[in-house]
Amino acid sequence: MQLVVATTMLPLETVNDIFSFLSSDFTTLKKCHPLFPDIVERWLYASINLDNSGNAEESGGERSDNGLTIDTLSFALVLLDKPHVADYVRRVRIVLPAILCGRMHASIVLSALSKITSITLCWGDPRLPSSEVSWTSLHKTFREVVASRLRLPSIKEVTLPRIPNFPISLFDDCKGIELLSVQGILYPFNFEFFPRLRSLGITYQAYIAQSWGSDSTLRSLSLDFYAHFKDEDEYITFPRIIQSCSTTLVNLGLDFRN
């Protein structure tokens, strides 16, 4: 009780700084919510992990690098009761295909998040290739909302899994992306799509496009291959990529696997 009283007498800026150290300790944040609802909500919902697979219940609000794990319906109800919470979300991670069970809720929630800086799509169980579905088999509304979120001026970081038929054209207007991580086939594009890109990671049978631009701001490049290049042309393309960012590149990671 003495600690609670002492804390409530501190300036709000100091209290906010204290909670910043608890940003991933959701159990503690929830317990403190009745005392400092406005401040706690800013940290509790700063990073959310939308998951309908049942992991939300299993996590029990413990520490997590993926953010607060919550199913889409529950978070939709949070936003219905407290619309201002949407402005606190900065990072969102969406688990597929479990999210398909509540795709309309996912679309509603995602469309409300207009200030996010990071968006991640991932498969519920990356060990099961059968869990992958093509982009065109996702609900049209969900695809449209994802596309609109990718084009938000605030978006700086994007992580995508292997999604068959994913249209690379969605990146045409994504000028603010600085960190991009892609699993699966990388369709032809050039650095002009990403004038601010600083970090690029490609994994899982990646195809190196031959249309990379001659100028880039890339500082970190990671290429992780699970298969050989498809043909000799790709060996020729690889040096072009390195050359295009030779004046800016600081970190380079390569992993060629059979």
Image (cartoon, rainbow, N blue to C red):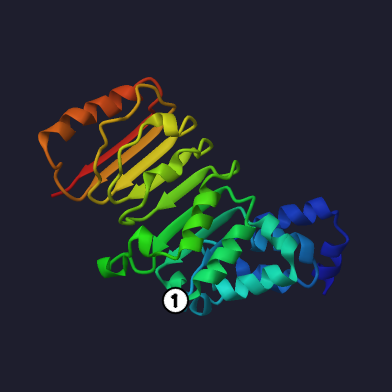
The residue lying at 45 percent from left, 38 percent from top is 172
Quarter where residue 78 is shown: bottom right
Query: What is the three-letter code of the residue carrying label 1?
Result: Ser
Q: Position of residue 197 (x, y in %)?
A: 46, 34
Q: Position of residue 230 (x, y in %)?
A: 14, 42
Q: Is residue 234 above or below residue 79?
A: above
Nearer to the camera, 252 or 49? 49
Quarter where residue 233 is shown: top left
Residue hosting label 1: 53
The residue lying at 39 percent from left, 46 percent from top is 181
Left or right of 121? Residue 5 is right
Left or right of 189? Residue 29 is right
Quarter where residue 92 is shown: bottom right
The residue lying at 14 percent from left, 45 percent from top is 228
Q: Position of residue 83 (x, y in %)?
A: 73, 64
Q: Is residue 27 visible?
A: no
Q: Is residue 64 above or below residue 149?
A: below
Q: Position of residue 51 (x, y in %)?
A: 49, 70
Nearer to the camera, 58 or 145? 145
- Which quadrant does the N terminus fall into? bottom right
Nearer to the camera, 47 or 8? 47
Q: Residues within 10 Å of mark 1 (few under 14, many from 20)?
A: some
Task: Give the secondary structure at mark 1.
Answer: loop
Q: Is residue 104 above or below residue 89?
A: below
